[in-house]
Amino acid sequence: MQPIPANAPSDAGALEPYWTFYGAVVAEQLRRWLPTRPSLLLDLSGGRGRWPAQAARAGHRVVEVLGFRHASERRPRDTVTGVRRVRADDLAFLPDACVDGVIAEERVLSFELMTESVVEDVARVLRPGGRALLCVDSLVLGMAILAEQSYWAHLCQTTDVMLVPWPDGSITRCFSSAQLRELITSTGLEVEWIRPRTVLSPSMIDHVIRSGSGSMERLVRTELEAEPDDHDTVGIHLVASARKPL
C-alpha cells in the first residue's frame, strides 16, 4: 500500500501512472459534483490541489482558505480569476449560511484530528440546500501505514478514533464509511453518497496504461461507474457528498 504523493517514499515514481489516474478521477468527480448554476464555493484544501481553479473555470466564485486549522499547505503558484485567497485557521470570519458549497479535498479533514468541529463549521456556513464534498483517509490506508511501521499492537486495538502516525512525523485520522457517515449526520447534514476515491488497483491501472489497451478517460469512467460492495475493504481514501437540509 502506497500513501499519496506528499508522503510517498522516494521510489513512489513507480506509481506515477496511478497518481495521474487518481488526479483525473478527482477532477471528473468534482466536475460532476459542482453546482449547475454559478455559486459561491469555499475551498479548505489549503492550496494542495487545483480544485479551486477548476471550479472557477466552471463559472463559480471561490474563496480558498490557506492555513486552515494549521494543516500543511502548498502555496498556490498563480493568481486565478474567480478565486479569492484568504489566510485563516478557522471559519470564524464567515457568517452563518453564506456559501453554496464547501470543498474539503486533499485529506484536510484527516489532518485535523478534531474533525467534528470542522464539519460543524462546514454545516454552519452552508446555506440551506448547500452541499459539501469531503475527502478523508480510510481505515484501509491507516492499517497499511501501521503495518508498514510494525505497529501490530495498534492494529489489534478497536477504538472509535483511529489516529495514525506517519514516518514523516505527521498524524492523520482515518475513518470507516460508517464513521464518516456518523460524522456528517451528527452535524445535521444529510449524506448523499460515500464511496472510495478509487476502486481500481494501482497494478491494474499501470498495466492498462502501459499496454495501451485503454484510454485515461475510459479508465476514469469505469472507476466512477464502479459500485463496491464494501466501502471499508478497498480504497486508501473515502470521499463523501453531503447536503444541508432546506
Image (tube, rainbow, N blue to C red):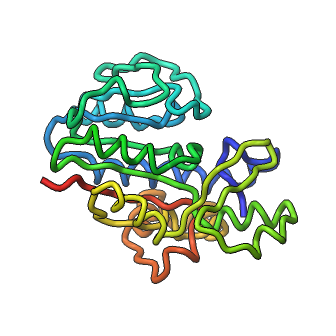
The number of discs equals 0
Q: Is residue 84 above or below residue 128?
A: above
Locate the N terminus by quadrant. bottom right
Q: Name the residue rendered at 45%, 83% in the picture.
A: 229
Q: From the viewer's perspective, is 156 left or right of 207?
A: right
Q: Residue furthest right?
A: 150
Q: From the viewer's perspective, is 105 left or right of 138?
A: left
Residue 225's x, y, as percent? 37, 71
Q: Nearer the viewer, residue 165 or 55?
A: 165
Q: From the viewer's perspective, is 169 left or right of 236?
A: right
Residue 52 appears in which quarter of the rendering? top left
Q: Is residue 36 above or below residue 74?
A: below
Q: Nearer the viewer, residue 82 or 114?
A: 114
Q: Name the residue rendered at 33%, 57% in the picture.
A: 241
Q: Residue furthest bottom?
A: 229
Residue 140's x, y, as percent? 63, 68
Q: Residue furthest top?
A: 79
Q: Name the residue rendered at 33%, 34% in the picture.
A: 42
Q: Is residue 22 above or below residue 180?
A: above
Residue 117 appears in which quarter of the rendering? top left
Residue 64's x, y, as percent? 39, 27
Q: Name the residue rendered at 49%, 80% in the picture.
A: 230
Q: Nearer the viewer, residue 176 or 239?
A: 176
Q: Is residue 181 above or below residue 62?
A: below
Q: From the viewer's perspective, is 159 left or right of 59?
A: right
Q: Nearer the viewer, residue 135 or 125?
A: 125
